[in-house]
Amino acid sequence: MNSTGLHHINKRKRANSNLKPYPNQDPFVRFLDKLLLFIAVAGPIMSIPQILKVWVDKATSGVSILSFSLFAIFDIPWIVYGIIHKEKPILIAYILWFIANLSIVIGVRLYS
């Protein structure tokens, strides 16, 4: 239960909003939707060299455990947001980023 009463405002906004159909009729918007799904996967894949450096080479010098720990922690609210709002690109991207960041943190903890 929302004690601030703001949930009524949000219900009114949703009821009066003109949400676009999915998939969108505009080819550019459909392309953008597909592009974001690609980027949601491609972005975290770019961290594979860092993961390999930590796990295969066991080279942890210069890797900030604080930074990667905070990256992983800050991924969690985005994952929750993606679940609540049913936003597939956000959900995919931040689950993959969380896995990548957490694997780096665990590797640094093991090998330093």
Image (cartoon, rainbow, N blue to C red):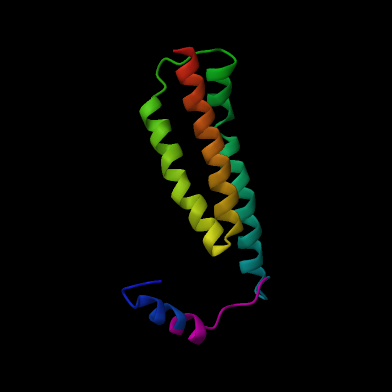
Height in image: 49 above or below 58? below
Q: Which corner quadrant of the image does residue 27 belong to?
A: bottom right
Q: Which corner quadrant of the image does residue 62 belong to?
A: top left
Q: How many marks?
A: 0
Q: Can you give x and y, in whole percent of width and height, for residue 81 in the image?
A: 49, 57
Residue beneath the point at 35% across and 76% down? 6
Height in image: 36 above or below 94? below
Q: Can you give x and y, in whole percent of width and height, for residue 36 in the image?
A: 59, 55
Instruction: Find the magenta span and give its range.
Output: 12-22
User: 86 or 3, which lies in front?
Assistant: 3
Does the segment drawn in magenta span residue 13?
Answer: yes
Height in image: 35 above or below 54? below
Q: Can you give x and y, in whole percent of width and height, for residue 72 in the image?
A: 45, 38
Residue beneath the point at 38% across and 31% down? 67
Residue beneath the point at 41% across and 32% down? 69
Does the segment drawn in magenta span residue 52?
Answer: no
Left or right of 30 in this view: 85: left
Q: Which corner quadrant of the image does residue 7 belong to?
A: bottom left
Q: Can you give x and y, in whole percent of width and height, for residue 98 in the image?
A: 52, 39
Q: Residue placed farthest to the front in the image?
A: 1
Left or right of 12 in this view: 25: right
Image quadrant holding the N terminus, namely bottom left
Left or right of 95 in this view: 12: left
Residue beneath the point at 50% across and 32% down? 102
Q: Residue placed farthest to the bottom in the image?
A: 16
Image quadrant holding the C terminus, namely top left
